[in-house]
């Protein structure tokens, strides 16, 4: 059994320790917001937080999360009202939407560690999150809008 915290709940899974976290989340836990994109940790569609840090779940063995805390897009907000989710809608970020959960998770980790990022910090944090629709300017605008509204505390 591999115990860890998932979206603030204690869970245990009985799987091979080398099983990618992505498949545990999607297939065993039913959390399908985290997407499979490339399977090589290159596109960012599978981004989740591991103890608050953005990581790619498609290549991360579930054994690496033992005793740690994992947050998925479903864990950011019960009602889809996380400030980034609201900003994504306000700035009309999604087109096809496939990459957006990973984009939001990367942005949330950035704002948690750097509440007032400049353009360079945003570019660096979001590097490796691929959007085939090319909504990068809207993604940056949404992140900046949340940072501008933020008054202390974690996002």
Image: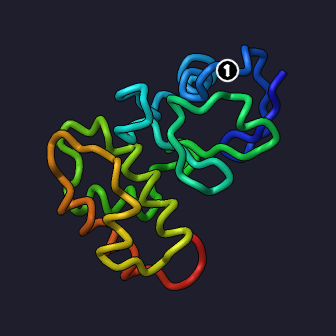
Q: In the rendered image, which quarter contains the N terminus?
A: top right
Say which residue appears at 38% left-offset and 56% top-offset.
85
Position of 11 relative to 116 (above/below): above
Q: Is residue 44 above or below residue 151?
A: above
For the residue pair 138 and 86, the one nearer the viewer reads as: 138
Above-or-below relation of 123 to 69? below
Q: Nearer the viewer, residue 137 or 89?
A: 137
Q: How many marks?
A: 1
Q: Residue furthest bottom?
A: 151
- In the image, 81 versus 108, the foreground residue is 108
Identify which residue, 59 or 143, lies in the foreground. 59
Residue 15 as seen in the image, left or right of residue 86 = right
Q: Residue at x 50, y 40 (%)?
A: 56
Q: Local crowd at mark 1 within 10 Å, few (<14), some, or many (≥20)?
A: few
Q: Is residue 38 left or right of residue 105?
A: left
Q: Position of residue 39 (x, y in %)?
A: 42, 25
Query: SS of the residue at dot 1?
Result: loop
Question: Can you give x and y, in whole percent of width and height, for residue 20 in the image?
Answer: 59, 24
Residue annotated with mark 1: 18
The colour style of the image is rainbow
Q: Where in the figure is residue 151, as x and y percent of width and height?
A: 50, 85
- Taking the spot 43% from the left edge, 81% from the top edge, the residue there is 116
Residue at figure coordinates x 17%, y 43% from the top left = 95
Query: In terms of image quadrants, where is residue 149?
Result: bottom left
Q: Is residue 20 left or right of residue 110?
A: right
Q: Is the residue 10 above or below the residue 58 in the image?
A: below
């Amino acid at each position: 059994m591999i115990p860890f915290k998932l979206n603030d709940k204690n869970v245990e899974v009985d799987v091979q320790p080398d099983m990618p976290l992505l498949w545990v989340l999607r297939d065993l836990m039913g959390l399908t917001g985290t997407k499979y994109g490339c399977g090589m940790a290159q596109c960012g569609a599978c981004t989740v937080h591991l103890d608050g840090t953005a990581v790619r779940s498609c290549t991360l063995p579930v054994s690496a999360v033992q005793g740690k805390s994992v947050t998925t897009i479903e864990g950011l907000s019960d009602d889809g009202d996380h400030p980034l989710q609201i900003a994504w809608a306000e700035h009309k970020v999604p087109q096809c939407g496939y990459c957006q959960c990973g984009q939001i998770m990367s942005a949330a980790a950035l704002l948690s560690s750097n509440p007032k990022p400049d353009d360079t910090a945003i570019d660096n944090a979001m590097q490796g999150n691929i959007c085939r629709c090319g909504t990068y300017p809207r993604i940056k605008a949404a992140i900046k809008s949340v940072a501008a509204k933020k008054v202390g505390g974690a996002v």
